[in-house]
Image (tube, rainbow, N blue to C red):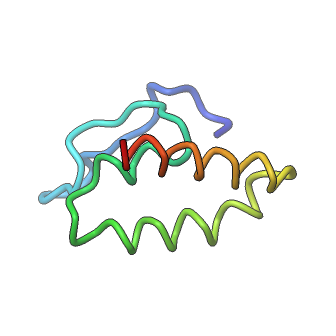
Amino acid sequence: MLSPDAQVCVDGTDSPEFDGWQWVSYWYPLGQVISFKKEVYRRALRELAPRLFHNMEQVRRAEHNRRSKEQS
């Protein structure tokens, strides 16, 4: 993101989907999203990862660590 945080607007419509935002680790949303949306988020994050990260091994390791935490 190239703009200042203050320029992020999540309430620009009459019926916004989000009421706020914060910076979090890449895979964090999978542990927070409601269960019926989880697979859609997972697919989206996997699809975007190669475009956002040059070191895919680091991304895979982060996802593995996240899954391990979910299972414990």
- Vertical arrangement, residue 40 with respect to residue 62, above or below: below
Question: Left or right: 36 with respect to 56?
Answer: left
Question: Left or right: 19 with respect to 48?
Answer: left
Q: Position of residue 65 (x, y in %)?
A: 57, 43
Q: Residue at x 24, y 46 (%)?
A: 11
Q: Position of residue 64 (x, y in %)?
A: 59, 51
Q: Quadrant of residue 8?
A: top left
Q: Quadrant of residue 56?
A: bottom right
Quadrant the C terminus occupies: top left
Q: Position of residue 4 (x, y in %)?
A: 56, 26
Residue toward you, 21 or 40: 40
Q: Residue at x 51, y 48 (%)?
A: 27
Q: Residue at x 85, y 50 (%)?
A: 55
Question: Left or right: 48 with respect to 23?
Answer: right
- Vertical arrangement, residue 56 with respect to residue 8, above or below: below
Residue occupying the far left of the picture: 15
Residue occupying the far front of the picture: 72
